[in-house]
Image (cartoon, helix red, strand yellow):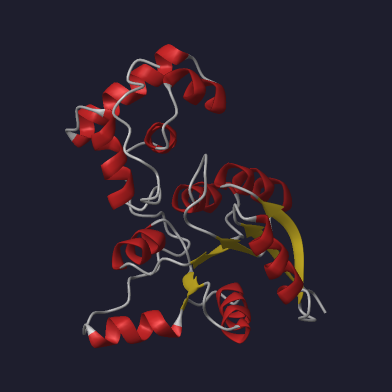
Amino acid sequence: MNKITILLADDHALMRDGCRMMLELENDFEVVGEARDGRQAVELAKKLHPDVALMDIAMPSLNGLEATRQIHHASPVTKVLMFSGHSDDAYIQTATESGAAGFILKQNPTQDVCRAIREVHRGKTFFSPDIVRHFDRKKLPLPGYAGRRNPKPARLTQREMEVLQLVAEGNANKQTAAELGIGIKTVEKHREHLMEKLDIHHTAGLTRYAISAGIIENTVPLITAQEDG
């Protein structure tokens, strides 16, 4: 029997350990890799081409939403299943627009998580029962799945999204440049483009935008300094 190969992406080691133990009890699952942030998840997806990536949203360096967009192109065979404690409508909508095939909540029982993995592996969509009930109560359709089509184009480029997250997390230009392997002047230029596109003119505004867009969690303090890196 060919097993469903799974990549786990979560910045909490305890969560990854728990997921691995849970999934490896299933005879048809094999966990082939673990990532501590979105950037590592993309690299492992390129290398391993797993059937399913179980992806947290809020991760440092590169969040799960942007990682999903990149995996969508880097490993088209990989279906991404969002695995999050956040169930805001905006998170769910953005996740599907990014190319995620489903959205399961961390508080859901094991059988729901396993069913979700099997469903998205078969090319279907899966939303947590809690999410389905929520949308039913609001009389709203579930967000459409971008599937193997190109995800809805974002206003920002991939690099701009990466810079936005790092800046919003409080990294100075020098730190952002080191993380991305680019020059400080290039970071400054990306920040200029970000502010121009979003009509935002200070770092605190970029942070608020990143929180509202689900790029970072609102536990990150607003940064008003570090403008010059």
Judge by depth and name the residue closer to the eye, 111 or 120.
Answer: 111
Seen in the picture, residue 144 relative to 77 is either above or below; the reply is: below
Judge by depth and name the residue closer to the eye, 208 or 149.
Answer: 208
Residue reaching furthest right?
1
Report the quarter where the C terminus lies.
Answer: top left
Judge by depth and name the residue closer to the eye, 7 or 99.
Answer: 7
Residue 124 locus on image (x, y percent):
51, 77
Report the quarter where the N terminus lies.
Answer: bottom right
Name the residue located 39 percent from the left edge and 48 percent from the top edge. Answer: 215
The number of numbered badges drawn on the structure is: 0
Residue 205 visible in this rendered orientation of the protein: yes
Name the residue located 68 percent from the left edge and 56 percent from the top edge. Answer: 13
Seen in the picture, residue 113 relative to 175 is either above or below; the reply is: below
Seen in the picture, residue 90 relative to 45 is either above or below; the reply is: below
Residue 88 locus on image (x, y percent):
33, 67
- Relative placement, left or right, of 175 versus 194 is right
Residue 198 figure quarter:
top left
Name the residue located 20 percent from the left edge and 28 percent from the top edge. Answer: 196
Residue 38 locus on image (x, y percent):
56, 47
Residue 155 visible in this rendered orientation of the protein: no
Name the residue located 42 percent from the left edge and 37 percent from the top edge. Answer: 169
Residue 23 locus on image (x, y percent):
72, 74
